[in-house]
């Protein structure tokens, strides 16, 4: 997702302009949707996508755009250091926002830390990321949310790391977390991440409380009664003798959560990693300003036909769907039904990834 406007980066500069007092002049890059600058920039009320597409210069001071075009250099203080980056042939964009990442801290720092995750984000041009709550311990308490928020400020290197809290205590689906206290501590949203809240009454109450706090619910839509112990799409399951995850496992909860949210005034629902055509149809049917949805690069770039063997590298949740599903995802990107691309960045240690061949369901 594009549009944080915390600064401007290019593929060569994203790693260097954070945490530095120097000014930066980015020259001759192709500037895409950079928006307005100066007083208009600070007061902008329109979409970040201004439609600008031009080769020009961009000036950055104190981490913010201060000049654009032929006069960009003149907006910089002549008595202060300035790094000049030649960006000919490169794109210059607003900072990207990733609504769905797993940064593994606390509890799984052998996979990644908040610091290393922030560095990776900056290297890719991301200035804001929302980190999911499946940490150890689960991000379900004021203490854990504060730890993530404070650690992110210390180690984030200029990248905004926004913690997402779990919906239920321990992600067990039995008791709602203290939502108001968690928002005060820094939670930007709530998600059961990696699973759905099976209890509909509990989920309805979660929507009610989140709406009162004006924060969204991020929903991982998966009915485990349908998915069971599946690992791949039905098409791939038939080819390799594996257990399937029917696409209805996703679309059933997509529809349920949409209807639950629609029954609560001002309830905001964001649907994570949409993969199935039926899910897109439902989102389009009920589309409004309180309903958003994301799609991941792997789901719109690959399909289950790309799986040529029972290769564990293709194991993901939700699974790669059919070519027909993929075509609908691409259409959803084009027509705005799926306006957000999120990565679902989820690092694992190398030894954990090499063990995937010995997972029984992949044998």
Image (spheres, grey):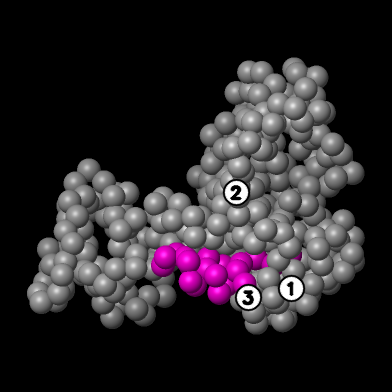
Q: Secondary structure at mark 3?
A: helix
Tell whether 143 sits left or right of 171: left
| Residue hosting label 2 | 111
Tell whether 262 sits left or right of 6: right
Earlier in the chain: of badge 1 and badge 2, it is: 2
| Residue 235, picture quadrant | top right
Q: Is residue 291 visible?
A: no
| Residue hosting label 1 | 141
Count residues near mark 1 (Cα–Cα under 10 Å), then give few for <14, some for 14-19, many for 20+: many
Q: Secondary structure at mark 2?
A: loop
Residue 185's place in the image compared with 249, above or below, is below
Depth check, front residue: 172 or 270: 172
| Residue hosting label 3 | 146
Where is residue 323? Give x, y as percent: 62, 28
Count residues near mark 2 (Cα–Cα under 10 Å), then give few for <14, some for 14-19, many for 20+: some
- Where is the C terminus found, in terms of image quarters? top right
Where is residue 357? Give x, y as percent: 71, 26
Question: Residue at horizontal 78%, vertical 47%?
Answer: 222
Q: Is 249 included in the stretch rendered in magenta? A: no
| Residue 122, picture quadrant | bottom left
Tell whether 337 sits left or right of 94: right
The magenta region covers: 146-166
Earlier in the chain: of badge 2 and badge 3, it is: 2
Question: Residue at horizontal 55%, vertical 74%?
Answer: 150
Question: Residue at horizontal 42%, vertical 65%?
Answer: 157
The residues tagged by marks 3 and 1 sit, at their Cα atoms, a distance apart of 9 Å
Depth check, front residue: 26 or 51: 26
Where is residue 80? Give x, y as percent: 14, 74
């Amino acid at each position: 997702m594009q549009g944080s406007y915390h600064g401007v980066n290019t593929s060569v500069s994203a790693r260097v302009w954070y945490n530095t007092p120097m000014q930066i002049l980015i020259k001759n890059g192709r500037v895409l949707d950079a928006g307005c600058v100066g007083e208009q920039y600070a007061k902008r009320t329109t979409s970040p996508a201004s439609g600008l597409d031009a080769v020009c210069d961009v000036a950055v001071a104190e981490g913010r755009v201060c000049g654009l075009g032929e006069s960009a250099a003149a907006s910089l203080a002549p008595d202060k250091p300035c790094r000049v980056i030649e960006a000919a042939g490169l794109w210059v964009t607003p900072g990207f926002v990733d609504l769905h990442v797993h940064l593994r801290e606390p509890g799984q720092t052998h996979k990644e830390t908040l610091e290393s995750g922030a560095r990776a984000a900056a290297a890719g041009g991301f200035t804001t990321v929302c980190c999911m709550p499946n940490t150890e311990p689960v991000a379900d308490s004021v203490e854990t949310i504060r730890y993530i928020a404070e650690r992110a400020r210390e180690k984030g290197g200029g990248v905004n790391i926004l913690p997402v809290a779990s919906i239920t205590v321990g992600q067990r689906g039995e008791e709602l977390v203290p939502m108001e206290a968690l928002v005060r501590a820094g939670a930007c949203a709530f998600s059961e991440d990696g699973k759905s809240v099976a209890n509909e009454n509990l989920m309805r109450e979660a929507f009610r409380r989140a709406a009162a706090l004006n924060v969204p619910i991020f929903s991982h839509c998966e009915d485990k009664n349908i998915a069971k112990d599946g690992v791949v799409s039905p098409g791939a399951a038939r080819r390799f003798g594996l257990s399937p995850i029917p696409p209805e496992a996703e679309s059933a909860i997509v529809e349920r959560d949409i209807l639950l949210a629609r029954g609560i005034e001002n309830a905001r629902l964001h649907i994570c990693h949409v993969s199935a055509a039926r899910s897109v149809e439902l989102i389009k049917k009920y589309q409004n300003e309180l309903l958003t949805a994301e799609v991941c690069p792997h789901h719109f770039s690959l399909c289950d036909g790309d799986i040529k063997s029972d290769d564990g590298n293709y194991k993901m949740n939700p699974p790669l769907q059919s070519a027909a599903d993929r075509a609908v995802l691409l259409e959803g990107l084009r027509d705005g039904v799926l306006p957000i691309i999120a990565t679902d960045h989820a690092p694992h240690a190398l030894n954990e990834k090499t063990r995937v061949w010995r997972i029984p369901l992949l044998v």
